[in-house]
Image (tube, grey):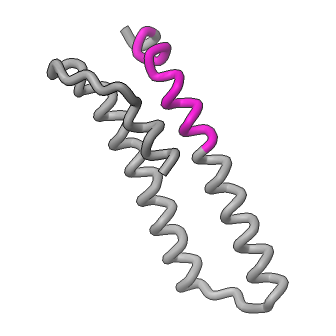
Amino acid sequence: MVSEMIVELQPQLHAGTVLLAFIFFDIVVGLAKAIMTHSYSSSTMREGLAHKIGELLGYIFGILCDISLPQLGIVLPVHLATAVCTY
């Protein structure tokens, strides 16, 4: 059952990997800029972290919708998790 679900979620998992890579590079670039300009601010860092957590929660919500909507008889032409990552 779980292995079948993982196979069905392959496109969403690939999109999540790309999302995590972009989040990682955004953090690295932001830290590099802050170090170079000597403008490190923990409040700005916390705000950015909150945005990243929001992105991850949106992605998880998309996965949950992709899993549950077909069980309710609602079939969409796109994967919501992939659409959230694309946005």
Q: Is residue 17 left or right of residue 61?
A: right
In the figure, 32 relative to 1: above or below? below
Residue 42 sits in quarter: bottom right
Image coordinates of residue 54 in percent, x first then y, are: 41, 59
Q: Residue at x 62, y 56 (%)?
A: 23
Image coordinates of residue 44 in percent, x first then y, are: 56, 82
Residue sitting nearer the eye, 62 or 41: 62
Quadrant holding the N terminus: top left
In the figure, 9 relative to 84: above or below? above
- Give the magenta part as a residue range: 4-18
Q: Residue at x 31, y 34 (%)?
A: 64
**What secondary structure characterizes most of the magenta part?**
helix
Report the residue that reaches farthest toward the left: 72
Q: Is residue 87 left or right of residue 34?
A: left
In the figure, 59 relative to 64: above or below? below
Q: Is residue 12 left or right of residue 31?
A: left
Q: Is residue 73 magenta?
A: no
Q: Residue at x 38, y 50 (%)?
A: 58
Residue sitting nearer the eye, 21 or 87: 87
Q: Is residue 10 magenta?
A: yes
Image coordinates of residue 34 in percent, x first then y, are: 74, 82
Residue sitting nearer the eye, 73 or 13: 73
In the figure, 24 relative to 13: above or below? below
Residue 32 sits in quarter: bottom right
Image coordinates of residue 26 in percent, x first then y, are: 67, 63
